Structures are given as structure tokens and as C-alpha cells.
Amino acid sequence: MVILPPKCLITQCLNFGGDYILGFPYDAACFTLFQEKMLLELREYYPTIKMGHYYHFVSSMHVYKKHYPMIERISKNYHKDVRIVMPRMKDTLQIKKLQYNEEVIRTKSSAKMKKLTDDFCIWCQNILLNNRK
């Protein structure tokens, strides 16, 4: 984590090794979530701090042979103009509810999910709901 003028939180992650399919997507999601949470906590001491960039470096990225067809499909459908904009997290207390809802979705439980009000948590939950199997 680095804070630079004009008070931006810049986060860098360095992984020794990473699987492009089974690891990197989860690593990037997890570490950007940490960055969101850090920003909210730092705002208690630096109220004007803004979200900076996130940089993810992997020294040895790999793909397993069984995932080659998936990589080919991703390559064919890759568009340089596609950007995903993630809403800013505003309420860290909502994370507990999101974690509960993630377990309900993952385990296909019949339990009722908890209501979310934070745009970031709603965005994450929608990704989970849209990708369940």
C-alpha cells in the first residue's frame, strides 16, 4: 500500500506464481476488496483520501493444459475496449452480509439471503448470482 499526493491509495500485489484460470481472478478480486476496505478505514484519519490504482504482478503465470480450450475461447472473445467498473465500497459492515449470502448461493441453501444496501456488495452478489451453476 502506498499513499501519494494528492492522497491516493495505490495498491500493489506481487505473487510469486499464479494460475491464470484458478488463481488470478480470485487473487485480483480479493486484493481489490482489501483495497476498498483499507480506503474506508484510512478515511477515518485522512478524510480526503481517494482510491488510486491497483497493480497486480505475477512472476510466474501459468495455465494448466486442461484449461487450454478455455484460454482459446477467452482469446477469441477478447475485446480491448471492454472495461469493468466496480462501484466503490461505502459500508464495511455490509461485508458480513455479503459473506453470508455468498455461502447461501454457493451451497444452494434454501436460507433467505440478507438484504444488501451497499452498491459494491450488491454488485459482487449479482456476479455470484449470474455465475452460479
Image (cartoon, grey):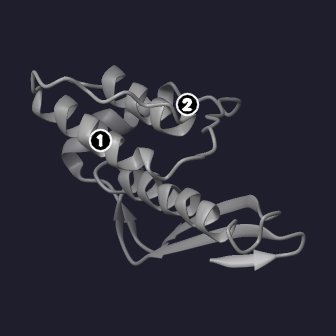
Residue at the limit of the structure toward the right, as seen here: 6
Residue type pointed to by label 2: Tyr
| Image position of 97 (left or right of 40) | left
Residue type pointed to by label 1: Tyr
For label 1, the residue is: 68
Q: Nearer the viewer, mark 1 or mark 2?
A: 2
Report the quarter where the N terminus lies.
bottom right
Residue found 82% across the figure and 76% down from its top: 4
| Image position of 125 (left or right of 88) | left
**23 shown above or below 89:** below
**Disc 1/disc 2 C-alpha distance (Å):** 15 Å
Residue 97, x across and y down, in percent? 33, 41
Circle 1 packing at 10 Å, graded few (<14), some (14-19), many (20+), is few
> Which numbered disc covers residue 78?
2
Q: Nearer the viewer, residue 13 or 112?
A: 112
Q: Nearer the viewer, residue 88 or 55?
A: 88
Residue 26, x across and y down, in percent? 36, 52
The quarter of the picture where residue 103 lies is: top left
Q: Earlier in the sequence, mark 1 or mark 2?
A: 1
| Image position of 79 (left or right of 16) | right
Residue 13, x across and y down, in percent? 52, 72
Q: Nearer the viewer, residue 110 or 2?
A: 110
